[in-house]
Image (spheres, grey):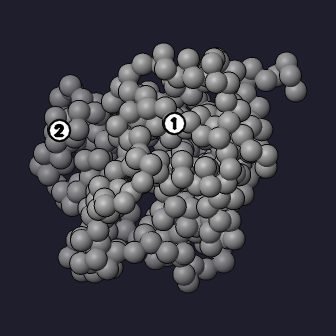
């Protein structure tokens, strides 16, 4: 790949420093993805500028108009504090006829709206846990024909926001309490789904029309299963001491039967296409002991930190971090956005 002018767009508070010298791992964690991506792109030889975005697109428009980057490397996960608004920033890039990395606006819309994505997947007969949406501001009514235990989470937030051991409920009163917590403390609608016991595995996918499936990765819960529900709480994902105490690790999934791996491959591709995803994404699954597979959710533009699941899965397939970022850039440059129709 030739050297490019790359505008890296990040949240305003996540613009990383030039050096991490003297900083603790905890301090670095907040903007580790941004640091890894920017540092690596510069090491490759690309000309990189970084733009922090909070609640205005004026700076983005100016940077595109004045500097004319070859591509925008999009690391935004929200706009003005609203997770589902990141799709509008990407739509703005398309209106500016500006190539960008990652998922297109429609794919972001469908995958970020968890109830809608589940409805689409169910229509395509892709197995997902039975679910119900309990909107904020409405009187609580326990969903019918759903079997306990149930799992309660935000209908829109990601990064396990609002998820803890209390998210798995065993009766109607616990359900009502947890739904109230999501409504009041997280501030969103609540998504309730049947809890699926089993292995939690992740499948990364790269591509637009032609897809590359990365090796199956697994979140291993260590000793948590002895007396706790095995779910990806915020502590499980981000608390290093908690991970060490329970022996929580992420690694290539072992001992999955060829039939299960083939099923995960088919389902990941079907989900990617059903939701109209592009660029790169990660699908989260539960694999029961009997070999049945259920999709939990699809994550467009998953975390790209070098040490996290997506990059490590790619590495296990022989795709180093520099190569991975260059592939994501190439996919962004090749994506057939509507504005390109007249130029193809």
Q: Residues within 10 Å of mark 1 (few under 14, many from 20)?
A: some
Q: Residue furthest bottom?
A: 255
* Front position in the image: 41 or 84: 41
Q: Position of residue 263 (x, y in %)?
A: 64, 65
Q: Which residue is mark 2?
A: 185
Q: Which is in the foreground here, disc 2 or disc 1?
A: 1
Looking at the image, is 294 positioned above or below residue 298? below
Query: What label sits on residue 50 in the rendered view?
Result: 1
Kindly tell me whether residue 35 is visible in this rendering: yes
Taking the image as shown, residue 269 lies to the left or right of residue 105, namely right
Residue 66 % position (x, y): 63, 18
At a point 48% along the width and 16% down the height, the residue shown is: 58
| Nearer-N-terminus badge (2/1) | 1
Q: Residue at x 79, y 46 (%)?
A: 2
Q: CA distance from mark 2 to mark 1?
A: 33 Å
Q: Position of residue 235 (x, y in %)?
A: 26, 61
Number of disc labels? 2
Q: Nearer the viewer, residue 8 or 193?
A: 8
- Residue 228, quarter of picture: bottom left
Q: Is the C terminus in the top left, top right, bottom left or bottom right quadrant?
A: top right
């Amino acid at each position: 790949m030739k050297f490019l002018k790359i505008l890296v767009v990040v949240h305003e508070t996540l613009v990383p420093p030039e050096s991490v010298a003297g900083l603790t791992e905890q301090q670095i964690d907040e903007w580790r993805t941004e640091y890894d991506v920017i540092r690596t792109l510069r090491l490759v030889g690309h000309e990189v500028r970084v733009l922090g975005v909070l609640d205005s697109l004026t700076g983005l428009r100016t940077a595109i108009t004045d500097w004319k980057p070859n591509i925008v490397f999009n690391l935004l996960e929200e706009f003005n504090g609203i997770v589902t608004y990141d799709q509008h920033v990407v739509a703005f890039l398309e209106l500016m006829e500006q190539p960008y990395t990652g998922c297109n606006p429609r794919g972001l819309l469908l995958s970020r709206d968890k109830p809608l994505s589940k409805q689409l997947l169910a229509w395509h007969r892709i197995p997902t846990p039975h679910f119900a949406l309990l909107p904020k501001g409405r009187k609580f009514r326990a969903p019918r024909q759903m079997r306990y235990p149930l799992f309660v989470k935000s209908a829109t937030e990601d990064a396990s926001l609002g998820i803890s051991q209390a998210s798995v409920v065993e009766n109607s009163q616990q359900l009502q309490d947890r739904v109230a917590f999501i409504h009041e403390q997280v501030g969103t609608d609540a998504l309730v789904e049947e809890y699926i016991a089993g292995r939690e595995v992740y499948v990364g996918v790269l591509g637009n029309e032609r897809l590359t499936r990365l090796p199956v990765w697994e979140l291993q819960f260590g000793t948590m299963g002895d007396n706790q529900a095995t779910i990806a709480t915020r502590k499980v994902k981000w608390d290093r001491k908690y991970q060490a105490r329970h022996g929580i690790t992420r690694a290539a999934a072992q001992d999955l039967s060829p039939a299960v791996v083939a099923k995960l491959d088919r389902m990941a591709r079907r989900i990617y296409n059903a939701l109209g995803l592009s660029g790169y994404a990660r699908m989260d699954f539960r694999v029961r002991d009997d070999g049945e597979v259920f999709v939990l959710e699809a994550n467009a533009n998953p975390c790209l930190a070098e040490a996290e699941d997506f990059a490590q899965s790619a590495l296990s397939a022989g795709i180093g971090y520099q190569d991975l970022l260059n592939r994501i850039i190439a996919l962004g440059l090749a994506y057939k956005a509507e504005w390109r129709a007249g130029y193809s």
